Image: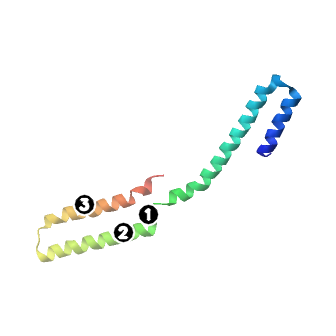
């Protein structure tokens, strides 16, 4: 039954039953309308939820690409420092930075 039909039925019931039942009729009408609003909101939220959760999250392809680039970059830097003879103490902050970037990028994966 549509909202207009519900309202017409409530007004008709009020005419038939008289003012003694007015409060009960109004409460019943408002309860039905509240449930209809809740149903519509739930329906819209259910439709929007998959769209929202997919937005802003890295895809599996992006995660794989970052992992490949990170490992490649880390390996190249490690080999370069070893071949050039630079202090290997530089490797720890470089690899920690690479790990931090990966953790931040992939951090949204477990949140839902």
At label 2, counting other C-alpha atoms closer than 10 Å, the crowd grade (few under 14, some 14-19, many 20 or more) is some
- Tell me how the rendering is colored: rainbow
What residue is pinned by disc 3? 96
Residue 102 x, y percent position in the rendering: 34, 62
Q: Which badge, 3 or 1, comes first in the chain's sequence?
A: 1
Instruction: Please say if 75 is above or below 3.
Output: below
Q: Kindly report the distance in space between the C-alpha atoms of the residues bearing marks 2 and 1.
A: 10 Å
- On screen, 23 above or below 99? above
Q: Which mark is residue 58?
A: 1
Q: Which residue ends up furthest to the right in the rendered image?
A: 16
How many discs mark residues in the rendered view? 3
Q: Nearer the viewer, residue 108 or 33?
A: 33
Residue at the spot of label 2: 66
Vertical placement of residue 97 versus 74, above or below:
above
Q: Nearer the viewer, residue 31 or 101?
A: 31
Compare marks 2 and 1 and give the one earlier in the sequence: 1
Quadrant where the N terminus lies?
A: top right
Compute the Cα span from label 3 to label 1. 21 Å
Residue drawn at (79%, 27%) of the image: 22
Residue 74: % across, % down:
25, 70
Which secondary structure, mark 2?
helix
Q: Are marks 3 and 1 in contact (CB under 8 Å)?
A: no
Element marked by disc 1 = loop
64 sits to left or right of 7 = left
Q: Are marks 2 and 1 in contact (CB under 8 Å)?
A: yes
Q: Residue 99's spot in the image, x, y percent?
A: 29, 61
Residue that appears at 79% across and 39% down? 7
Pointers 2 and 3 in contact (CB under 8 A)?
A: no
Residue 29 at x, y = what percent? Answer: 75, 35
């Amino acid at each position: 039954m549509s909202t207009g039909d519900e309202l017409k039925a409530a007004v008709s019931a009020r005419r038939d039953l008289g003012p003694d039942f007015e409060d009960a009729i109004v409460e019943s009408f408002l309860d039905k309308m509240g449930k209809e609003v809740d149903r519509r909101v739930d329906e819209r939220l259910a439709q929007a939820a998959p769209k929202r959760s997919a937005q802003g999250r890295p895809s599996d392809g992006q995660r794989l690409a970052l992992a490949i680039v990170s490992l490649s970059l880390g390996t190249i830097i490690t080999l370069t420092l070893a071949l050039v003879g630079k202090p290997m103490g530089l490797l720890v902050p470089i690899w920690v930075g690479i790990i931090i970037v990966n953790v931040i990028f992939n951090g949204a994966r477990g949140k839902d």
